[in-house]
Image (cartoon, rainbow, N blue to C red):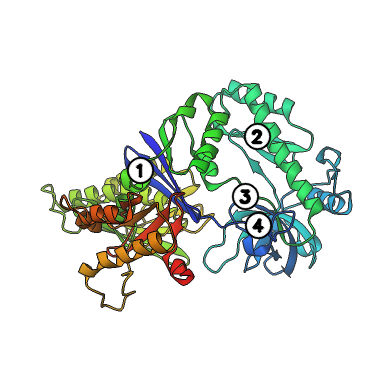
Amino acid sequence: MTELFISATPKKISIALTEDKRLMEFQEATQEPASESGSEAGGTAQTMSFSVGNIYLAKVRKLMPGLNACFVSAGHERDAFLHYLDLGTQFPSYKRYLKQVRNGSKKAPLPIEKAHIEEELGKDGSIQHLLQQGQEVLVQVIKEPISTKGPRMTCEISFPGRYLVLLPFQDKVSVSTKIKSSSERARLKQVVQSIKPKNFGVIVRTVAENKRVAELDTEMRVLVNRWEETIAKVARANELPTMVYEETSRTVAMLRDLFNPSYENIYVDNEAVYNEVKDYVTLIAPERADIVKLYKGKLPIFDNFDITRQIKASFGKVVSFKRGAYLIIEHTEALHVVDVNSGSRTRNSDGQEANALDVNLGAADELARQLRLRDMGGIIVVDFIDMALAEDRQKLYERMCENMKQDRARHNILPLSKFGLMQITRQRVRPATEVNIDETCPTCHGKGTIKSSFMFTDVLESKIDLLVNKLNVKTFTLHVHPYVMAYITQGIWSIRRQWQMKYGLGVKVIPNQRLAFLEYQFYDRKGEEIDMKEEIEIK
């Protein structure tokens, strides 16, 4: 059973995917409010996000002939990287069309159907013959900023949809190789060829198999409209660099790539995001729209469905997986290193070789999950427990390959080397997900001494008194650690009951597993956090 859980706040959105109640994927994205002073075409550099798929009208900042590449100013604190091979075979057509759009009418840019298609660009050319410093280029993010590196860009613009991927300035229709039926492949190719506009190429995705012409045509119109809106912003842009197209929200983008009929439920704890997800699922699978549900429980959604506990157990340097065995995961700038340990596991009665194989197979299962969960990319080196038998090493390799079939990211797995190391490469388009499971004391901030915990309830009551009597906030929710919640709710005449009698029934207390022991948060009736430091300053 596959379920999706979405937790949204004004500052952050978190998405968790579970299979049979087990956490398999977890993503977090910050949500920054748009700047009111942004340009008409998409905002200023300070408010730009650099998610994969975003498109920018940028300027060439510096040519690097030795790398056959250039650095592009796209609004990030570090310049974006654009290699010659990422210009694409249709770059001459793009270059000419962009110049015509920028010099033409801002109200009615030149339609792509009337654009002239130039001769394709060869693979062995030089970037300094095509670009010059200060030149305008239309680029799309293919790799998000990672560590000290800026984003990586391409000039091969694409607009992905549920069934189709639209490629301006190309004329080829390609069908996913995962569609095995030759007759269905031929049908899809013929259908898409008949509905696509001139000067557009299309990639037909696997989920388009057996879809009706009307469904494909509807999505085609949506994707073409996105291109037209993007070019309209390009024509109107006054300040460079500027974002001219922003990829759909992380929630919808994940649904677009992951959604399948096996989903049992999609729970969302925010009404606005719920409506967005509901509309998208209704569009792509009307018969499954009822699986989208608005969560209205008192507990935080991740706490209620046991996701918070799994997050804290699954992230960190040491990950336990099977009867005392564990993985040690280290991250470096160039690669990820994983060490497999049997730990306190009881030895197998069949001997050391059988024990090593059993631990390694369990490690392969957990490692495949960890790669998806943390979205680890680049080079991964795994030090498995040494095995003497070649057939056992082959079993481990086949088990790892089988586990990785569920991974959507492109990857390559090499058999164990003579040193017992397995090398894996996995597509990396964004930084690996890191969740800090170590808690810094919110009271002493690491100094080592705190006020007596028995006084903590007095601190909470003083905050409640400030909200109710000084700031006139009559209805709010207080989130505290579950242990604190247990303490203030014990007994018939509990501390919580006393607060409600003294300050009104609008005082609600909720346990929250994400909080440290003496940490607390106040939320108003709209679900927005009340910053008590700011409130005290106002007072």
The residue at which mark 2 appears reads as: 174
* Disc 1/disc 2 C-alpha distance (Å): 31 Å
Decide which of tag 3 and tag 2 comes sooner along the chain: 3
Q: Secondary structure at mark 4?
A: strand
**Nearer the N terminus, badge 1 or badge 2?**
2
Amino acid at the residue labelled 4: Met
Check disc 4 and report the residue beneath it.
153
Q: Viewed as shown, does residue 164 lie left or right of 5?
A: right
Quarter assignment of residue 406? top left
Quadrant where the N terminus is found in the figure: top left
Choose the circle earlier in sequence order: 2 or 4.
4
Mark 3 and mark 4 residues within 8 Å of each other at the beta carbon: no
Q: Is residue 331 left or right of residue 114?
A: left
Give the mark nearer the N terminus: 3 vs 4. 3
Which residue is located at x 28 percent, y 65 percent?
Answer: 518
- The location of residue 38, given as percent across then percent down, is 70, 59
- Which is nearer the eye, 278 or 201? 278
Return the disc, 1 or 4, that comes first in the chain's sequence: 4
Three-letter code, disc 3: Gly
Q: Residue at x 69, y 47 (%)?
A: 157
Label 3 and label 4: CA atoms lie apart by 10 Å
Residue depicted at x 56% and y 26%: 209
Say whether residue 385 is visible: no
The residue indicated by pointer 1 is 398
Q: CA distance from mark 1 to mark 3?
A: 34 Å
Amino acid, disc 2:
Ser
Mark 3–mark 2 contact, CB under 8 Å? no
Residue 60: x, y in percent?
75, 65
> Is residue 524 at least partly visible in the picture?
yes
Residue, disc 3: 53
